[in-house]
């Protein structure tokens, strides 16, 4: 939310990017999307590898016990 708040509420003169509020919002959204495209596959890969060596779920018996 903070990334989008910069585009929505930030002082455009202080940002000094030369972009309008709408253009700044597009840039901020692009940055969020780029981060998600990098982090999601990386996290998924690490979790799959971790789960292969150390299961991330408890056994059915332990889950039943609470």
Image (tube, grey):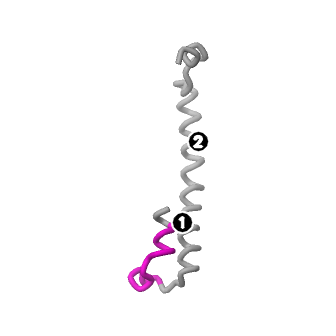
**Marked residue nearer the N-terminal end (1 or 2):** 1
Q: Position of residue 22 (x, y in %)?
A: 58, 79
Q: Is residue 38 above or below residue 27?
A: above
Q: Is residue 39 above or below residue 52?
A: below
**Distance from label 1 to label 2 (Cα)?**
20 Å
Name the mark on residue 31. Answer: 1
Label 2 environment density (alpha carbons within 10 Å; few <14, some 14–19, many ≥20): few
Give residue 29's quadrant in the image. Answer: bottom right
Q: Main secondary structure of the magenta part?
A: helix
Q: Secondary structure at mark 2?
A: helix
Q: Secondary structure at mark 1?
A: helix
Residue at image mark 2? 44
Could you tell me how many numbered marks the image carries? 2
Q: Residue at x 60, y 55 (%)?
A: 37
Identify which residue, 27 or 48, lies in the foreground. Answer: 27
Q: Residue at x 58, y 16 (%)?
A: 64
Identify which residue, 56 or 9, lies in the foreground. Answer: 9
Q: Residue at x 50, y 62 (%)?
A: 1
Label 1 environment density (alpha carbons within 10 Å; few <14, some 14–19, many ≥20): some
Q: Position of residue 55 (x, y in %)?
A: 55, 24
- Highlighted range, magenta: 4-17
């Amino acid at each position: 939310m903070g990334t989008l708040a910069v585009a929505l509420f930030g002082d455009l003169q202080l940002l000094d990017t030369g972009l309008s509020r709408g253009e700044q919002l597009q840039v901020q959204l692009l940055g969020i999307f780029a981060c998600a495209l990098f982090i999601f596959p990386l996290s998924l890969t690490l979790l799959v590898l971790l789960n292969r060596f150390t299961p991330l779920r408890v056994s059915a018996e332990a889950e039943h016990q609470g």
